[in-house]
Amino acid sequence: MDSELSQVAAAVAVADPALAAEWYELLSRSTPTPDDDQWRGLVDRMAPAAQQAGLSGPELMDALTAVDDPAALQAIIAAHAWPNAAAGDASAAQGSGSAGDGSADQAGAAAPAEEDPSAWNDFLIANGSAWDGTEASWQPFVDWFVYHADAAGVGRSARAFCDYAGANQPLSVFAQYGITIAAAGVQEPATAATEDVATQLAALSADILADFRQDYPQFAGVDDAEVLALLNEVVIHDDPAAVAPTT
């Protein structure tokens, strides 16, 4: 295995463990190719780490497409991303340890186990849109999402996805995966704009009232609401006589 890829794996694992997990998981599902959008996107995000190892983006893609043993590359990624699991049990770092030995759990968020990609995609599509798009609800959603993903047998994929999304603007990541979020947060700018207009209108009304009362002191005993209603009549009916000073 090319030593430069090992250096890339080390740099990615340090800079972004979730990206390392995504790389590991994608290797189990498909062969690297520049014609694949997921691989192109992954290589783009790995570019800074690749440059540390002396590889540009195109060179990294070339190195990945030249790999003839994806499992060996996965082992390299696991050794850097999950060193405790790799040191204690190399097979656990690759997700092949037995369910009862606990080695993967001891490593924390170990490498994704062999999970059915179709089952994971179906789960993500069915449940991803349950998030309301707000920052405040993100962690409760993650807890709920991972809990049900465990029950569906795709818990490791769900954890890797949530880690990656949490580090890379969740709304953008959900959109990247085709998940539409009816985000409450998206409505906030419109609400803020509406409130700003209301504030400006209130300030304008106050200025108009002040000018009016200065010009027409005889209306001092009339409350603001009645004065504004009177001014509204003047604007609508173009009848300045409506506020002509009385003599």
Image (cartoon, rainbow, N blue to C red):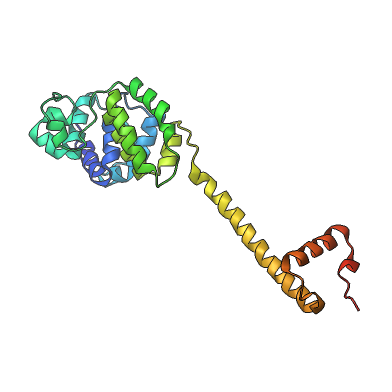
| Residue depicted at x 89% and y 63% | 239
Q: Is residue 123 visible?
A: yes
Residue 106 quadrant: top left
| Residue depicted at x 44% and y 32% | 129
Residue 80 quadrant: top left
Q: Looking at the picture, how far across and down is residue 162, in whole percent?
A: 33, 37
Relative depth, front residue between 226 and 119: 226
| Residue depicted at x 22% and y 26% | 113
- State which quarter of the image contains the N terminus: top left
Above-or-below relation of 118 to 7? above
Q: Residue furthest left?
A: 88
Q: Is residue 63 visible?
A: no
| Residue depicted at x 36% and y 38% | 141
Above-or-below relation of 196 to 185? below
Residue 137 quadrant: top left
Counting labels gives 0
Relative depth, front residue between 132 and 118: 132
Q: Looking at the picture, how far across and down is residue 196, in whole percent?
A: 60, 58
Relative depth, front residue between 9 and 245: 245
Horizontal side, residue 66 vs residue 99: left or right: right
